[in-house]
Amino acid sequence: MIPRPEFPNPQFERKDWINLNGEWEFELDLSASGEDKEFFRREKLNDRITVPFCPESDLSGVGFKDFIPCVWYRKELEIPKEWKGKNILLHFGAVDYHAKLYVNGELACEHKGGYTHFYCDITKYLKEDNNSVILCAYDDVRSNNQPAGKQSGKAYSFGCYYTRTTGIWQTVWMEAVGENHIKNFKIYPNVSSTSANIEISLSQYAAKGTLNVKAFFEGREVGETSAKIYSNATNLTLNLREEHLWNVGAPNIYELVITYENEGEVYDTVYSYFGLREVALTRKGMYINGKFTYGRFVLDQGFYPDGIYTAPDEKALKKDIEDSMALGFNGARMHEKVFEPRYIYWADKLGYLTWGEQANWGLDITDPGQIQHFIPEWIEAVERDFNHPSIIGWCPFNETWNFRGKEQANSVIKDTYLITKALDKTRPCIDTSGNYHTITDIYDYHDYMQDPDVLREQYKKLDDGEVIDQVRRNEIKNNPNARPRQSWKGEPLFCSEYGGIKWDMDALVDGVDKEQKISWGYGDVPKTEEEFISRYEGLLDALLEREEISMFCYTQLYDVEQERNGLMTYDRKMKFDPKLIYKITQKKAKCEEV
């Protein structure tokens, strides 16, 4: 059976496709000398791997967890006869980090970026038969020249750094399209007019024909529009005959069929969906479709015990969201990672809010030249996920303390914020999560105070802004590389990391943490389950009592390796009665009563 057999991106789906997951030839290149040795001309590699799982994972069948500077993959392709005369697109969901694709021994394309999708039109490199592709991927999380997220820069996992991912870690697939085809589209919902504006980009030489768009709701056709093509970029307005708003817990989805044709010949058909949803900010907080929405977020790191960055199956993606909702949360920070599209698809389908982030850790952004290693991939991430209704904000950076004492990060952060807003004017953007803002729409901060009484007293000073500055001073005291950049000026407040209470029953013996040097979490370990619940409720109450705070994000949903501060274990077992956690998490905030 093919692993991960589902189409990888329901936002942009064609019916004419082939899933290439499964067994590939494989070889570790620990000296990174394979190009010099012309591995790309080889007719066989020495080992095997199960794609799309990375070689560090158990599911890959390799399980090599030391540093891997380079890997090689090889696959023989069978092109269906009915695809003859069409353009063949070879897609990679994600390859970490610098990928080079060879087709029949020729370099066809390359891509830098470990978290975003890329594809290559391989048509001109193909032969009548006996076709093969070879992919090599270079990866160096210790270089400070690539976003690496929570991947460990040491030989082992430690603190909040975990097992690395190298090479292919999302689905690989082929599609057949005409030379004239749909490349991309962006959907701008308009709630007030029950419509959507759709910007469609076509392939380079598309300059004739017609675009037809149809919308369906629960199988009923509820809208259609068309436009003649005079360039390779076209705008259409789709009026909807039925209004069904997308919101938290109300995941109303319109299905789309976009067809590109000319004089009766269909060039391309793409299937997609969207939600009728708009996001706005006031000083009070976030509004969805004109209704104030309190953000009850949880930190989701997107790690899996057997697949690391890759979920073992689609059920695991959906279950993480369902478990989070069962604990009372209405959304997640997709933390230090660009999540795979099918996770966000299930957030869309379940009415679950998400924040889009990039895995910026590992990159030295105090060097302005490093923007070349960040911006192109971040643009790809925003463009890929733009149409997801569940994504209600962007956050390109997290905790960008000045690298090794250097203080040149401000310009990179500001430029990235401005680029993000140019790409998407419909969502708020947090420039860098965690107290050190340069320019931001929402003032978020991290506060891991573990004593609820101290936290409550601290927040009594919130009226004059002192508490936010105090939180920053505490962070600076603990991290000499941290320097404040921007003070709170009345923007909506988001406590985007707090809690992190360690709870690991396997490590507790007579109420004492016997594995404190192995497992990790914030603060002293509660001695009983009742003590944990009391602290969890007390910390949350301190936030809910403040009218100025309109969003929180608890650290975290589940344990990750040695980090044991989740509400679930790493293998997704509930640590506490979910009904009790749900009741606490769902307590009404003061700003919801105003």
Image (tube, rainbow, N blue to C red):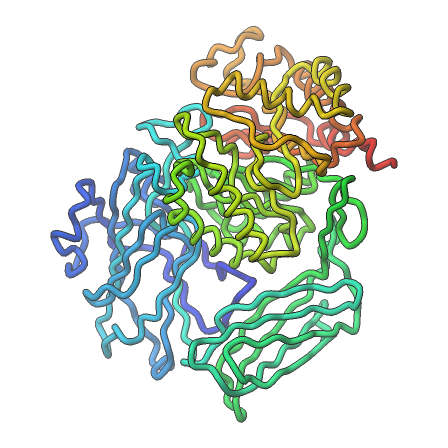
- Quadrant of the rendered image containing residue 61: top left
Identify which residue is drawn at 15% across, 61% down.
41
Q: Is residue 303 visible?
A: yes
Q: Position of residue 243 (x, y in %)?
A: 79, 66
Residue 297 is left or right of residue 242, and the answer is left
Identify which residue is drawn at 66% across, 25% down.
468
Which residue of the protein is positioned furthest toward the left in this rendering?
Answer: 37
Position of 194 relative to 388 (above/below): below
Q: Is residue 328 visible?
A: no
Count of labels shown? 0
Q: Position of residue 95 (x, y in %)?
A: 36, 51
Identify which residue is drawn at 37% across, 80% down.
86
Position of 414 relative to 584 (above/below): below
Q: Position of residue 451 (x, y in %)?
A: 67, 14
Where's the N terminus, which quadrant? bottom left
Residue in front for this viewpoint, 160 or 192:
192
- Quadrant of the rendered image containing residue 296: top right
Residue 167 is left or right of residue 241, and the answer is left
Where's the C terminus, which quadrant? top right
Q: Position of residue 477 (x, y in %)?
A: 53, 16
Which residue of the protein is positioned furthest toward the bottom in this rendering?
Answer: 263
Residue 272 is left or right of residue 44, and the answer is right
Residue in front for this viewpoint, 245 or 18:
245
Residue in front for this viewpoint, 404 or 239:
404
Identify which residue is drawn at 17% across, 53% down.
35
